[in-house]
Amino acid sequence: MKASKAETPAVLIELDIVERNLQRAQQMADGISLSLRPHIKTHKLPRFAQRQIELGARGITCQKLGEAEVMADAGLDDIFVSYNILGASKLKRLKALHDRIQIAVAADNNTVIDGYSAAFTDSNHKLSVLVEIDTGGGRCGVQSAKKAVKLAKRIKASEGLSFGGIMTYPPRGEISDVNASLSRAKAALLDAGLKVKCVSNGGTPDLRFAGDVTLATEHRCGTYIYNDRMQVSYGHCEISDCALSVLATVISCPAEGRAVIDAGTKALAADFCDAPGYGHVLEYPDALVQKLYEEHGVLDFSACESMPEVGDKIRIIPNHVCVVSNLFDSVHLVRNGLIEETVAVAARGCLV
Amino acid sequence: MKASKAETPAVLIELDIVERNLQRAQQMADGISLSLRPHIKTHKLPRFAQRQIELGARGITCQKLGEAEVMADAGLDDIFVSYNILGASKLKRLKALHDRIQIAVAADNNTVIDGYSAAFTDSNHKLSVLVEIDTGGGRCGVQSAKKAVKLAKRIKASEGLSFGGIMTYPPRGEISDVNASLSRAKAALLDAGLKVKCVSNGGTPDLRFAGDVTLATEHRCGTYIYNDRMQVSYGHCEISDCALSVLATVISCPAEGRAVIDAGTKALAADFCDAPGYGHVLEYPDALVQKLYEEHGVLDFSACESMPEVGDKIRIIPNHVCVVSNLFDSVHLVRNGLIEETVAVAARGCLV
């Protein structure tokens, strides 16, 4: 079926662009001997995770246990859950995963480490725990090299655990700060007699500068598979590198220059980016996706030479793809304008 | 089970607050002889739609056909789809619904009306079509009374259709403009010899002023069942009237005054409101939900006298509940701190 015939709103994924984005990143990483560990939060599709591995990724990254369970069920066997996992039920699920596949987790505090240890005390192989370092991102992570050493020592001394290295979710555009923080942490860990097997950096925005983070042994990137308007605004890619679009139908042209489409925040999400509006209209690059309601998108075509009519379909590159994937039960895989396959977003809604 | 023991992130719905919100609105409407036609986009749960009817609502409103199908399957038999429905496949589904239950739809242009007529020409009972009026909201709707008359005449003259009246999605706080637009449209329609059976107004923000829209015969409101931080900022309700909260776990307290929770935009959504941040923390009213990543929420407790520890759970009233309901496969129904039942969000993800 022609992609343009899909019921709207729908997600279209251009397979050729996906493949190009994956290959380009893997080649870049291979060229600087950096391992990739792609984050599947963006696509949530086992097939793309498998393709990332085939192309050379050393494993995958998940943010939630539910995502890791879906991926493990599909045969992915080396997963880093880059998250502090807490609570009896989640630790039990983590242990069940660890019994089946190679899994590692993050920690940035004692409570989390002690939870891991209590759950893995009687495990026949140790759980690898990486210490998260805040390199300026202001999210999770220890604030000093000294604290990193304390946690690494605690991990090493804990039954059932092994110290797997350090990780960070870096601030965008602050390579030298990231380098400095990681260097201080690594040096302090080595001084303390701890081996740092892995230094895991992340993010798509600075993927092209990944080689400048000289200590990193692996890079976790997610959005690069599809790209989006936010990544374009960051300079990571061009609009032509965006693989995912939302197909929408114009349902009304109520006033001059205004058209309303059947996609709102429940399809495009309310995320902002540096560019104005809520998305880029492929057929009308000068159109502004001005306002989103839940099920309506209001577009301003006053800067365009023409505008669509009621019943026309248009494609919108969203500001942030990762949240859009999570809003759709299924997506259409497209090549040369045709839908090759429609697949369920296997890890959609894996919040827990 | 205690609600506080739920796996996080989770949606908790306080049943007593739901019931109070529903009763309060229905009593207000009864007092001014206004029919309510609640919008189910907020809760997407057949049981609450049924309760709205039991309390006296004349029917329900859906925005998407998929929602209407779920509700019809659950026995709801009077549904207004307040949307321009377009395209062969959707019109076929609309006809199938119309064969089972009482259904009405909206239109604000010829293309949509002609589509309805083509699909319903051979129907044994007519499809009721309401003309949408833009009363200043700037979304869908005709821009003049003259255009409303033209469309109403077209509907009346179209095979398979009947003119059901007029509807609007009003701008907030502009009661006199809404009244003026509706008056002009109704007067012009009556002048043209058209009967205006229904004048459908909508929205929760101005629900308390619904009686001031004197021409309205029914009011479509959605958010009032749960309420949210946006409605608090609009003056519709207090925080104590908010029935839905997101339960989250503190996974990290990496720096002074900063805590990170396991709920980000995939649980709380990125919607803004007039109040700062992304939600209201029930246990720490002075905390700021400062930044949301997809799976992390970063909270600033510097204005609070104390802050939670890693492993503690907190409840957050989101800025906008309607998009939060749509992110969770199931929600917990809570009374007196206990989960009475966990139910699937039946119409979640009904985008088409």
Image (cartoon, coloured by chain):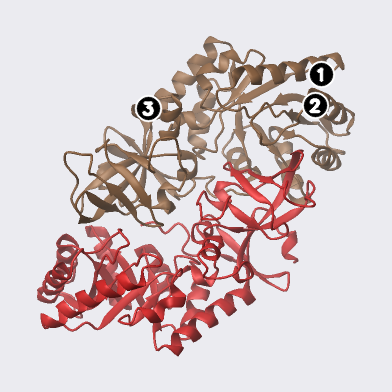
Chain colours: A brown, B red
Residue at point 68%, 38% (across, down): A83
Residue at image mark 2: A148
Pointer 2 local density, CA inside 10 Å: few below 14, some 14–19, many at least 20? many
Q: Secondary structure at mark 1?
A: helix
The reply to whether dot 1 and dot 2 touch (C-beta < 8 Å) is: yes
Quarter of the image with the C terminus of chain B in it: bottom left
> Residue A39 in the image: x percent, y percent?
56, 32
User: How far apart are labels 3 and 1 at the CA level?
Assistant: 40 Å
The answer as to whether the residues below labels 1 and 2 share one chain is: yes
Residue at point 81%, 18% (across, down): A189
> Residue B292 in the image: x percent, y percent?
59, 44
Residue at image mark 1: A189
Pointer 1 local density, CA inside 10 Å: few below 14, some 14–19, many at least 20? many
The amino acid type found where label 2 is placed reads: Ala
The amino acid type found where label 3 is placed reads: Asp
Residue at image mark 3: A241
User: How far apart are labels 1 and 2 at the CA level?
Assistant: 8 Å
Q: Quadrant of residue B141?
A: bottom left
Question: Is A32 drawn above or below residue B215 in the view shown?
Answer: above
The reply to whether dot 3 and dot 1 touch (C-beta < 8 Å) is: no
Question: Is B111 drawn above or below residue A349 in the view shown?
Answer: below
User: In this orientation, which residue lies closer to the viewer: A114 or B17?
Assistant: B17
User: How far apart are labels 3 and 2 at the CA level?
Assistant: 38 Å
User: In this orientation, which residue lies closer to the viewer: B237 or A29?
Assistant: B237
Q: Answer with mark 3 or mark 2, whichever residue precedes in sequence.
A: 2
Which circle, 3 or 2, is nearer the viewer?
2
Q: Answer with mark 1 or mark 2, whichever residue precedes in sequence.
A: 2
Q: Is residue B37 visible?
A: no
